[in-house]
Image (cartoon, rainbow, N blue to C red):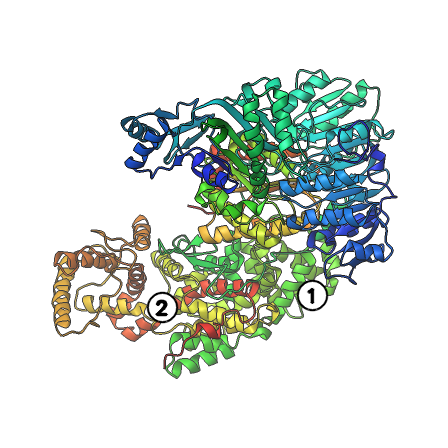
Amino acid sequence: MHKEGVAEFPYYVGINSLSELATKDDKVVVLNILGKESSGVTPISHEYSGGNVVFGTGPGKSGKSLPTKNGKIPVYNSIKEGMAAGHEFNTAVVYLPPSGVKDGVAEAVRDNPKLKKVIVLTEKVSVKDSRVMRAICQTNGVDLFGGNCLGVADSWNHVRLGGALGGNSPEESLIKGSVAIFSNSGNFTTTIAVYLATAGWGTTTSVSSGKDVYIHYGPQEFIYALNNDDRSQAAIVYCEPGGYYEKDLKSDKPIIACVVGRWKAKLTKSCGHAGSLAGSGDDAMAKEEWFKDYFGVKDIYTPENPVCSKKGALVTNIAHIPEALTKVMEANGKKPDFEPKGDLSLKCWFGNNNGVKLPKELDVQQVKAIEPYSEQIDALKQQVGAQISRETLKDASGASKMDPKTQVSQIHNVSILDASNKTFEENLVFALTHNYPSASGTAMANAVLNAYVNQHGQATLVAATASREAGNSPNTVQAAAVSIVGKNKAQKAMKAAEALLDIFKLTDMDNPEEKFDYKALVKGAASHKDALLDADAGAEAVLKQVQSKGQSVFIDFLVDFAKEHNGNVSKDAVVAAVWASLAWPSLRTKKISKHTLVRLPWYSMIYSTMVGVAAPDNQHSADSFCGIKNDDLLGNSFTRTAFQALMGRDASEGELFEFQVLLGLIITNGPGTISAQGSKGAVSADGPEQPDRVQINKSFIGFLTHTGFAHGGNGYEAAAFLIEQFKDSSLTDPADSKHGVDLEKLATDYAKWYGSYKKEQKGLGRLDYAKIPCVNHPVFKGKDVNVDPREEYVSKLFKDKGLYNVFLDFYHHLVEGLFKTKVTKNVYCVNVDAVIAVILLKMVWSDYKKGSIKEEDIEWASFMAFLFGRMIGCAAEIDDHTNRGKNMDTRTPASKVAYVG
Amino acid sequence: MQITGMLWGRKLLDLVEFPRSDVRGPEASVEEIKGMIKKHKQVFIKPFFKGGVGKKGKSGLIGRVDNLHDALKEKERLYFATHQDGARITKSNGVTFEGGVPADHEVYFSITDSTLYRAPCMTITHHGGVDIEELPADKLAVVPFDPLTGLKAFHVSNALESLGAPSEIISPLVQNLPKLWDLYNNYGMLMLELNPIRMFNNGKRLSPVACDFKCAFDQDDPAWKRLHLPDELFASDDSDFEQEINQLRTYQGQSDVYVINDEGTITAPTFGGGANAMVTELLGEDATISSDFGGNPPYVKMNDISKITFKYWLPQSNVLFIIGGKANNTDIYETFRAIGDGIKWYFQQHGPQPLFVVVGRGGPNLVRGMAYLRDTLDSLGIPYRFFGHDSAMSEVINYARAVNRWMLNGGKDEIKKSMNIK
């Protein structure tokens, strides 16, 4: 039962010509107009079509409206209400959810006898509803389009009905021409139009048919209307497997058929388009045959095998459509509509090898994108550095993590084992820039770090000394000094960093250690004179050191800038320039934010202060630190400076390496450790959502106050244990493998003693008996012979370097001895904390034996060394939390805490 | 979502009181089997496959017995039988025992939605019991009918008369077959096929008895849920990955996935049904999955999809290939932000992965979306190339494949080195 339409069809079809599909006379009602999809798409359709939407519906939404550039579209509860308000329409566009689509169509048909077209955009409409909708429309003489389609559009009439053909810029793809498009894919309807333009072909009417099981306006109807449309000279028909819609298609005009989806023959359920599930007779190969038979060709058209006839060509790749169309139209004596617009070659808009060397053919270079996209890409350059979305960082970090299986922690995805192969200064830079510096960068970093290490005459030293004399622990002493390094201390250097960022942010410079022509910037940066220049020449020494050791565009720029403006480069500007050099590649690759780059000098000064005040006040003088002349200190490695501050003497190369390993192993234990929590809590309390308000020095104080005799100071326990074992031995040089101490005996004797002690204590019911520090581990246990891989790694590292440590050797004898004397059931591991203790003890042993340092000095040094190492990890946490965290995000909700009183 | 066989078919047929053969499931006791043999003289033993498996008879997977010994032997043979259809191998888990129905006439009957007629359509013949494709057209009646009024007695009667069917079978079929429209229409079916319906003579008159059953459900029609069929009946159709993704199936944004090659090395979140057809075709066996995530999915859905997809497929993937045409209404910023955050999540959860990202896309908020993804990849140290919609999609696919080949030939190690992955 259907109304009488075009006589050629056994069912109702009302459209006679494609020119009638989308016209200026069509007036549209949109069902569920305020839904997410529709409210975004409808205004664009409305504006493109010159205002063709008369009203929309939304149950309970009467009185609301949808704003567009062409005025507000009124919204009513129902179609009936809208019509009662005097609106007339002939087209209904349906954006209802699937379960409501059938009812919406029924409402439109029932309430508006003048309805001629219904376009269903909704996806996942059930087949049952689809067949019922069709029956309703057939009975009432209404053309139905979709579902799951993107509607129809007409480039000549400048009208778009339903859906979003051409996206949010329809003019870009709906270019007036002579080709009609029918496509099962909404996306390809637009994409094919874009492709056609590259061969000079524009469009007349574009139909997105949808590819549900029911295609209500199918290829047969489309081709009939194509033949009656004088504007259309050819058609593109894109189809997929499933359904017999394209069978026996015949046209007066050429057709390029694109059939895609041979692989879908393997499918046992639909994927992508619901109607693309084929039987044996309507799969892609079958459809290819239908078209080949009709065109009278034997093959699929490809650029290598351009097979076509006057009737058309079959392609299986949409990229071949433009060329095939041109060839077929040539055979018909017709030329393209306009000059080709662009081409379809590979055009890379964004690319980065991120350090990987790609083969030439894959190393596709970026090109300027087509307008208006290239303008938008250029505008992106204004955004400098990483834009990190904020999240709650309670017990979470973007800087560190610990692998629960290996117990090896990582900082910026580098394991602490690898980090311990790097120097102290390299790790300090890495914590903040996420990149290890080059040799030249390291030398520059050493210069600026050492430039601020001598605290002579500074309030920091006074505070530290007062704190020390008051009997405070090393962390408290450090905190006292760091509290003095407030924002004002670093303000000038941060201003200089800000100035350099401002001057260079829009340049193409990727690496300031490579040549870059900055000459034009020198003159243009006059407004930054105050930030970069100084009246006196106080920066001369550090500038000279930096220039002699490294290469930095920023430093060269400063020198030329000072010359140009007859001033002197300020010391703050040198610090800023060096840190800008170190951080610039990370900024360019979006690893760090611009806020980080600006704050780096502040971190730098805190680093220097913490190392500086580790040395007592008698090691600081006007012209030297720990006996090293200030100018000489600039060329020192910062690792060596830290060693000197801690031990009061110079280090051998071997000691320096061991010291660096010691510090590297301490860097982090993940965001759960108390020290990390302290630093993160301090950032959180300042409110990182306004990063300028985060007090970096206070965050370091947070870290420092969250260390103590149990966390940081406990390294001493193992040292004390070892001192106890070796104090009566003849050991003089722990680095000498020929030390003459019978380690096996020492270990066995102790093991025996410990076995009887343990038995006795257990017998007395005392389960809190003394445990041997640094043996066994809750993860690395249970095997016959257990190994802590971190300790194993470091032992091998030292062995490869020819570095011997008698204390570590003793520990290995001890775990064997404990097993042999049956104190333990298997051979315990020597854990990584032992490594830290043995390195430290080795460094101080000869002084201890000489009596120049006491056990409490060892404890002090042990704790201070921990603070040096952990300073690296906490700097990373502080910066990460400042960039990524939210205000007060480390707090625990009241519902999650307990009262246990 | 298909059901084949009488184990579940009997339950569905009972809903509309359509006569069917006597059927027992694998739990049938020896006594019950004995009783069936005694009653029906002949019992058919068929393996039970979940999902759609046809032509069991041709594959030698139907046992016909008239004694208990043979019945048990056949049960043992068929219980875990394997059925191969092309590359697809299905394993049974159980058998049905179906009482033989002596008859002189076998009828084929089906209802589907026909794309030729764009209406529901009955296909019927009294030359049933064979493959329908093997019958000449003049022995089949294909009858479209109005979905608003449904399948009526006169459709059946006219069709059988036009085929010249024996008059004694027409009346019982006319009385019973229209009931099947209720089953088809009320429970969201896309296809319902009974072959054969054997015309059993009860001594007084002929009665149709369904002896095999096949149906497919429309997964977009929730009506099938009213049948309360056990979930595991359809679970075998989907891999774990597909099942997890399917839970996100809503009308706002597609989430169609299909596992192509579980040893593939390119994972391609694809946007749009057309792109899905083309990309999957050109990637071939390199692809892990075929997908369509188009339809403007909201951030949360796209992020969930990304996480599930990455969890299953990134460990083995060389190339993450995000591909679609020039989107009409899919917000590229929202989708790329969701994918970028998904990659970040994966790296946080599982550590860095040597990966190359290739993108081919166009649409609303394109540059903003690409910029977000670019920043994410830069921060993770992942190499990438993004192409706009002015590059031919097929060329972008070829580029992704070339990157994959390079990765397989040492490129992966290069990326591992640059990303500091041990």
Q: Position of residue B184 (x, y in %)?
A: 57, 38
Residue at left offset 78%, top offset 58%: A76
Name the quadrant containing residue A840.
bottom left
Q: What is the CA distance from the residue labelled 1 to the residue labelled 2?
A: 41 Å
Q: Is residue A185 left or right of residue A800?
A: right
Dot 1: within a 10 Å radius of its alpha carbon, few (fewer than 14), some, or many (20 or more) residues? Answer: some
Q: Is residue A345 left or right of residue A140?
A: left
**Tag 2 or tag 1, which sits nearer the N-term?**
1
Identify residue for label 1. Answer: A567
From the image, which quarter does the C terminus of chain A lie in? bottom left
The local crowd at label 2, few if under 14, some if 14 to 19, many if 20 or more residues have their Cα within 10 Å, is many
Secondary element type, mark 2: helix
Image point (79%, 48%), residue name: A45
Give residue A43's position: percent from left, percent from top.
Answer: 78, 52
Q: In which quadrant will I find the N terminus of chain A? A: top right
Q: Are marks 1 and 2 on the same chain?
A: yes
Q: Are marks 1 and 2 in contact (CB under 8 Å)?
A: no
Which of the 4 image quadrants contains residue A505?
bottom right
User: Mark 2 belongs to which subunit?
Assistant: A
Relative height, residue B421 to residue A573 (above, below): above
Q: Nearer the viewer, residue A733 or A681?
A: A681
As helix, strand or loop, the secondary structure at mark 1 comes to: loop
As displayed, is residue B167 above or below residue A555? above
Q: Nearer the viewer, residue B197 or A443?
A: B197
Q: Is residue B167 at least partly visible in the picture?
A: yes
Q: Amino acid at mark 2?
A: Met
Q: Residue furthest front?
A: B204
**Picture coordinates of residue A157, whole percent (x, y):** 86, 40
Identify the chain of the residue marked 1, using the numbered disc in the image: A
Q: Residue at x 30, y 52 (%)?
A: A792
Tell me which amino acid carries mark 1. Answer: Gly
**Image mark for residue A647:** 2
